[in-house]
Image (cartoon, rainbow, N blue to C red):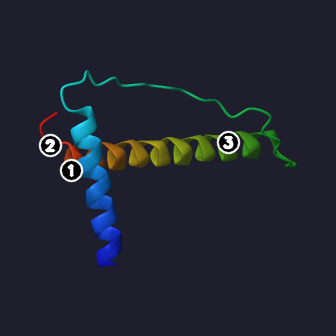
Amino acid sequence: MLALMMVAATIGLLAHVLVSGQKMEYYQGTFTISDIHVISSSERKSSNQLKDLQEANEDLVSQIKLSFHRLLQELFPKL
């Protein structure tokens, strides 16, 4: 466990040294999920299932963005 923490700290410090003084660039992307096939006897049920899946997907993406943002703040607190 300690070795893993040392490797992570080394990578973080190395990245910080290599990036310091350079302009940081941020990228934003979007993606879509196509060809969703839901087999159901009720079209209304399918639409509710799709809505639930979309909400769950948005929640997961939000959690990933927040976790990534917190990680960047820990690695590069001066930015």
Residues tagged 1 and 2 counted as in contact (Cβ below 8 A): yes
Which residue is painted at 42% across and 47% down in the image? 64
Q: Secondary structure at mark 1?
A: helix
Residue 36 in the image, given as x and y percentages of width and height: 78, 39
Assess disc 3: are there few (<14), some (14-19) or many (≥20) residues with their C-alpha within 10 Å of its C-alpha.
Answer: some
Assess disc 1: are there few (<14), some (14-19) or many (≥20) residues with their C-alpha within 10 Å of its C-alpha.
Answer: few
Which residue is painted at 24% across and 24% down in the image? 22
Residue 43 in the image, given as x and y percentages of width and height: 80, 39
Q: Secondary structure at mark 3?
A: helix
User: Gap between marks 1 and 2, in whole Å?
Assistant: 6 Å
Residue 13 in the image, given as x and y percentages of width and height: 23, 50
Q: Nearer the viewer, residue 39 or 31?
A: 31
Q: What mark, if any, has residue 74 been given in the picture?
A: 1
Q: What mark, if any, has residue 77 been given in the picture?
A: 2
Q: In this rendering, is residue 7 above or below 48? A: below
Assess disc 2: are there few (<14), some (14-19) or many (≥20) residues with their C-alpha within 10 Å of its C-alpha.
Answer: few
- Three-letter code, disc 1: Glu
Which quadrant of the figure has residue 24?
Answer: top left
Q: Secondary structure at mark 2?
A: loop
Q: In this rendering, is residue 63 above or below 79? A: below
Which residue is painted at 26% across and 59% down in the image? 9
Residue highlighted by disc 3: 50
Q: Nearer the viewer, residue 16 or 68?
A: 16
